[in-house]
Amino acid sequence: MNASHFPCAPRTRALPAVLALCLPLWLAGCALPRPPAQVDAPLPAHWRAPLPHQGDVAALARWWERAGDPLLAELITSAQAASPDLAQARTRLAQARAGQVAARAALLPALDARATASRGFNEQVGGLAGTAQIGLQAGWEIDLFGGNAAASDAAQARLAGAAAGWHAARVSVAAEVALQLATWRACTQQLAIAEADARSRGATARLAEESERAGFTAPATAALASASLADAAVRAERQRMQCETDLKTLVVLTAWDEAVLRARLADAPAPHPPEALFAIASLPAQVLAQRPDVYAAEREVAAASADVAAAEADRYPRLTLAGSVGQGWLHTGGTRASSTTWSIGPVALALPVFDAGRRAAQTDVAAARYEEAATRYRAQVRRAVGEVEQALVQLASTGARGADAERAAAGYQRSFEATEARWRAGLASLVELEDARRTALAAQTALAALRHERMAAWIALYRAAGGGWDAGEQAPGPAHAG
């Protein structure tokens, strides 16, 4: 930047003339210009993916209460209390709050109290004397070019961004726990299907074995039934292992005792959530306003803008004013004396003369960081739009496939039952029965997977839409841990 661009920039003229010009301007709010605190990010006029219907936008913040799963709410609360990511977000929030306090303090005078006491030989009285003194010292840097004000603005913006980051961490933990619980519930449903299939194959194998012993079934047919049973047992055991792994992951996330969690899960049957858990605003701008990460990126742009002004102000004169007031006492023998002192000043003016380009380099770095923050903000907006669109597509797709998947599962199950009845009557071969069984099993497995996919799509949409966060929502104070 060129110093000639600024109304308060000192030239190589007499210093009193510069002060005479700058002090009135400072009193009127003289500050160096800064880059825009807000940058434009292109947004689509509307969503291209279909929106969910029959939901309530207000239900987004705590959608799991509408899902009919009270255990999920408890698990989310526990996970948020135990999450290291949330603890880190709280630490960053505390640091940002402390930075804001320090930045604001730089705009105000500093006041220190001092007290001294001594006893020794005093030349003025020619003997031993005790002295004591108390006083107040004040110092104030007059913010001529708005550098301290800009630093305060940057700290305020970063505090708002840190608060939004804390909310983003809460949303992320809630989504992770909800997805893990949904995964475990889907796994148990798959396990129930696998175990039922194994029992059915076991009954077929026993009948085939008895028929072979009676001479009505060929050994190859009995061997096929036995192999089918073994295959089902392997599939069920593999599914059981996956469910155990999912449960232990849930234990890690929530910090619950495993035995307690197992008991609670056993007592809490799988809920049947409504078709629509929440709704999404039709305008992308309204949805992105609920994204704490987008808001945090926006606040970082504002903070970087203020940093540019603060770095530029460091290249210009700094004016400080000091003062003190004190009371002193002298005691020697039977004589006491006291005195009061006060002073205003010195008034100190620091004028940068030569720093080998250090301050100019700092300004260039601040400007580069501003460009980086602006680019990151635009990228975050694009990413947010993409995540919402993807979640909407997944949700619409699972909804469109649901009815057909249910009809397919029901139809193949009826076909299997009919084929099994024909096989028992000797009208169908075991090969036909196993083929019908595999088809029915695949349809049931696909239906369970689709239900899990749909719940995962709702959770992804919850996260992509910002979890119902509001910029006016209060973040935890220093004494608040939740």
Image: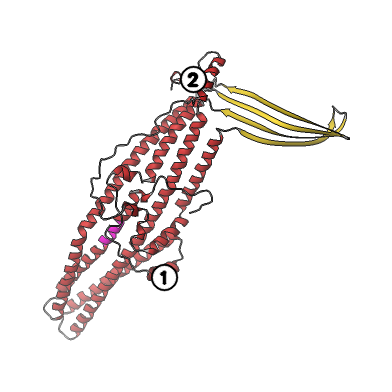
Circle 2: residue type = Ala
Task: Answer above or below: position of 61 versus 120.
Answer: below
Q: Left or right: where does residue 218 sit relative to residue 236?
A: left
Which residue bears the numbered disc 2? Answer: 9
Q: Which of marks 2 and 1 precedes in the sequence?
A: 2
Q: How crowded is mark 1: few (under 14 residues within 10 Å), some or many (20 or more)?
A: few
Q: Can residue 302 be seen in this view?
A: yes
Which dot, 1 or 2, sits closer to the camera?
2
Q: Is residue 311 magenta?
A: no
Task: Answer above or below: position of 136 versus 46.
Answer: above
Q: CB atoms at circles 1 and 2 under 8 Å apart?
A: no
When asked about the image quadrant of residue 6, the answer is top left
Circle 1: residue type = Ala
Give percent across and percent down for residue 482. Answer: 48, 54
Compare residues 357 and 119 and report the one nearer the observer.
119
Q: Which residue is drawn at 60% across and 29% down?
A: 140
Give percent across and percent down for residue 443. Answer: 21, 65
Gap in angstroms between the C-alphas marked 1 and 2: 73 Å
Q: Residues within 10 Å of mark 2 (few under 14, many from 20)?
A: some
Give percent across and percent down for residue 65. Answer: 36, 60
Which residue bears the numbered disc 1? Answer: 263
| Range shown magenta | 449-456
Give percent across and percent down for residue 318. Answer: 56, 25
